[in-house]
Image (cartoon, rainbow, N blue to C red):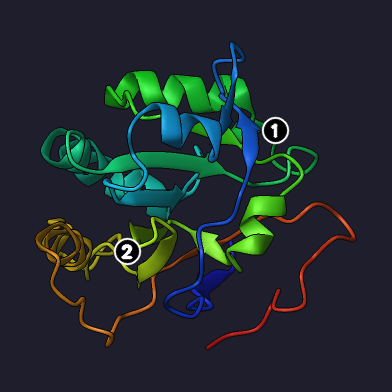
Amino acid sequence: MVLTPSTMLPLKHPLPQFSLPLVSGTATWSSRNDLISSGALPNRPVLVMLICAHCPFVKHVEPELTRLEADFKDRVTLLAISSNSLTTHPQDGPDGLRKQAEQQGWHFPYLLDEKQALAKDLRGACTPEFYAFAPENDGLQTLRYRGQLDASRPGNDLPLDGADLRAALNHVLAGTPVDTIQVPSVGCNIKWNPNHEPPWFGQST
């Protein structure tokens, strides 16, 4: 494990277009088709969560992700993405991710970014990472928040309450500005496919 902070993708970055398989193996989920068909555009914000099954930092926040889904599922489209290399970390393959979702009672789409294209589009660096997008007047989803869930970390005894992310989502839903002073998330580094690390791999901010 390499303790790694977010790269902090610039705010107002547009939501990337992507089409990825659900870990259930039953379908593909498309940012273009599924967001539109679910009514998420242009009305609903989108929360993208880069997570995985094995990371201790993700395991630490799992209960709060369950609470977030319960509290925001009717107002925000939640998406979980796993981008870890299946060559080096097969435990983050579909079977492990399905088991994780079942154990936590998650119902949001959980997608497998096996080629790691979405993680690179988001300049992802660690698990967990959180990206909250919201629509502009033209319906384009742009980044309003990227950073930590809250200040809780494994072993630091601070409350796991999702304070930072919840505040951002509540501002987005209220149509008020999100504070631009945002604290990076920190966790295990994304496990990039061998010889395909992005330029920021191994850097710290």
Q: Nearer the viewer, residue 55 or 167?
A: 167
How far across and how far down the image is residue 90, in percent?
70, 33
Q: Label 1 vs label 2: CA separation?
A: 42 Å
Tag 1 residue: 90
In the image: residue 181, left or right of residue 18: left
Q: Quadrant of residue 25?
A: top right
Is residue 158 visible in the rendered image? The answer is: no
Q: Quick one: SS at disc 1?
A: helix
Q: Nearer the viewer, residue 93 or 109?
A: 109
Crowd class of label 2 (few under 14; some 14 to 19; many from 20; radius 10 Å): few
Q: Nearer the viewer, residue 143 or 140?
A: 140
In the image: residue 148, left or right of residue 28: left
Judged from this view, the residue extending furthest toward the top is 26
How far across and how far down the image is residue 6, in percent?
49, 73
Q: Quadrant of residue 91?
A: top right
> Which quadrant would the N terminus be assigned to in this image?
bottom right
Residue at x 51%, y 76% (from the top left corner): 9
Tag 2 residue: 137
Tags 1 and 2 touching, CB below 8 Å: no
In the image: residue 176, left or right of residue 61: left
Residue 189 vertical placement versus 26 (above, below): below
Residue kind at label 1, given as amino acid type: Pro
Q: Earlier in the sequence, mark 1 or mark 2?
A: 1
How far across and how far down the image is residue 4, in percent?
53, 73
